[in-house]
Amino acid sequence: MKADVINNNPTVLVVDDNPKNVQIIALILRELKYKIIIAVNGNSAIDLVERARPDLVLLDVMMPGMDGFEACEIIKSKPENKNIPVIFLTAMSEKVNIVKGFEVGGVDYITKPFNKEELTSRIKTHLELKFTRDELQETTNHLIGLNSIKDKMFSVIGHDLRSPVGSIKMTLDFLKSDLGKQYKIEDFRATIDTLAQTTDEVFGLLENLLGWAKSQSGNLAVVPEDIKVSELINSVYLLHKGSFFQKKVHFEQTIGDDIVVHADLNMLKTVIRNLLSNAIKFTPEGGIVRVSSTSTNEMVNIIVSDNGVGISAENQLKIFDEKQHLTTYGTNKESGSGLGLILCQNFVKSNHGRLFVESKQGKGSSFTIELPSGGN
């Protein structure tokens, strides 16, 4: 750990109104290759802590105006400064007040005149402790994040996948039964169509769930390339052509062959797939889904719009919020997990873009993907 502290070149804020004390400390710390910032009073110390975010503060007790105890109390009153160690610099005659220093958030004290070995030893010790606490906090936050992913996955599996999988099982059990064997061919085909649609829904849910989990865990690499948008839209449309036909929803694409974006192909394909799937889901029979674009020299907007049921103003605030679990059903009771749009937002952001929505209940929705233009 000591080697790590030295290699990381920690930043130390020295607060003292005596130039000689500052000079001595600076000479000692520079030998250790530490970065040094200097304040001459309590107010400037508070300001520098906020702006420079030092790893440790050496704080003189007796200064004109605001003393070191008051400055430390103000610094430590902010939660973001909790892990910044403050060591007080005190004369032997002031040592009796050092308990107050611990009460306001100090971690140690050094008496003047300074002993070089004691000064460096105490600073190194508290920097090591500080970096260890930071690493532990980072690990804790990572574990909390992983636990949150696990809870979300279990929630989707238990709530959103259980229903369609249960429906598939019941239908297959019926077909195996004696009643199922008496099915007319027309009824049998209709049942097969329903099974295929339900299986597609389950597959889409699983793809979104796994894609979201990967994006949250940080294990997803972004490989940007120039993509001709019209070709991508056509390829994704072919995947959904059966759903458009089955629901009698019309599809219209007006993107020119010259529209190119710079993004990860698989990620953008997933985004378009989800937006088209949602548009079909929330558009009634006879409706229309349009894909269009606008562009500038630097950015391209891909717009997926429909004349479906629309989204309430309240739900528009929730659809991109990972803390919400918003599940809604389509016009033909199609299921969903609420993860699709969150996944889309994560993927678009990963490609230096934005995803936003305009919608009005009863009128339809318009989702816009803003991405860097390609071919430059």
Image (cartoon, helix red, strand yellow):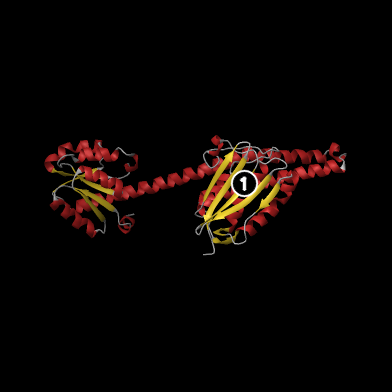
How far from the left and from the top, in percent, is residue 352? 49, 54
Image check: 123 left or right of 314? left
Nearer to me, 233 or 41: 233
Residue under label 1, please give it.
Answer: 305
- Residue at the extreme left: 93
Image check: 287 left or right of 325? right
How many badges with numbers are in the image? 1
Residue 98 lies in quadrant: top left
How far from the left and from the top, in percent, is residue 335? 66, 40
How far from the left and from the top, in percent, is residue 58? 22, 47
Residue at 78% x, 41% y is: 172
- Count neighbours of disc 1 (C-alpha within 10 A) and say few if under 14, some if 14 to 19, many if 20 or more: many
Nearer to me, 311 or 349: 311
How far from the left and from the top, in percent, is residue 253? 66, 53
Above or below for 261 versus 217: below
Image check: 32 left or right of 304? left
Residue at 83% x, 43% y is: 188
Image check: 312 left or right of 44? right
Question: Does dot 1 land on a helix, a strand or a loop?
Answer: strand
Q: Amino acid at mark 1?
A: Ser
Residue at 75% x, 44% y is: 195
